[in-house]
Image (tube, helix red, strand yellow):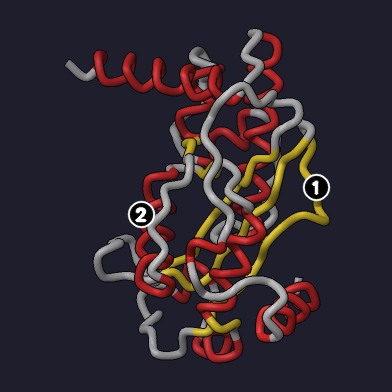
Amino acid sequence: MLEQIKQWIEQRRGGKVGSHDPDNLPHPKTPGDQLLTECRLIVLDLETTGLNPSKDEVIAIGAVAISGGVIHLDDQFDLVLRRPDLDISQTVLIHGIGPEALTQGHETEDALLYLLEWMNGDPVLAYHSDFDQKFLEKTLRSQLGYSQQHIWMDVADLLPAFFPDAKTGGKGLDNWADFFGLEVSARHHAAADAMATAELTLVALNRARKERVKTLRELSDKLRYHRRLQNMHRF
């Protein structure tokens, strides 16, 4: 990853990749008839200075791509941002990212531009995606002036949509990982959490295939139906 982004930055500064103009970046794809067995999905996790998108900031990004129904270890993203001015005193014990790491991290603008190029407009999945979506969209908007809307799907909805009777003992990532016997190597580390979420996503996609949910549009419709049922049960 370090060598890849170094090469990319050099190309960008040499004018080979594209300028800062957001219009030159890949456009987000929309859910259509793309087959789930063929399309590329981005599974993402962020580490932040807190839980409030209005005042807290992104400090690390971890992501991995699923394509052809497989997690590709050579197609992932794992970077700490260079943000030495941020106060991480309240969260350093959670994510382990200290002042030295933030001082030595990657320049935020370069990292975000590289992330957008790497994502290539593909749909994004995350566990409790509303959290990651708000933080990432805010950061892209403030740092790059980028405001295009990507497709986001919540793995915390995806799993109960396909496993409604699962007795997980809770709704967290750890609960589902334990239920399926998956090992999470390092919680609250963006890349490790993204990998665990990707593994859970594969479990859900395998069930989707058995239920004849074959396309990205059908998966999106399944999630929308599940959320509608959840909202109905609240009343």
Q: From where the camera sits, is residue 175 visible?
A: yes
* Residue 61 percent location from the top left of the image: 56, 64
Residue at 45% x, 29% y is: 157
Decide: few, some or many residues near mark 2? Use Cα within 10 Å; few <14, some 14-19, many ≥20.
few
**Kind of residue at badge 1:** His
**Kind of residue at badge 2:** Lys
* Residue 194 percent location from the top left of the image: 62, 51
Residue at 63% x, 34% y is: 201
Q: Position of 22 compared to 13: left or right? A: left
Determine the CA span between mark 2 and mark 1: 26 Å
* Residue 177 percent location from the top left of the image: 62, 37
Residue 8 in which image quadrant: bottom right
Residue 96 in which image quadrant: bottom right
Helix, strand or loop at mark 2: helix
Q: Which residue lies under the disc numbered 2?
A: 134
Decide: few, some or many residues near mark 1? Use Cα within 10 Å; few <14, some 14-19, many ≥20.
few
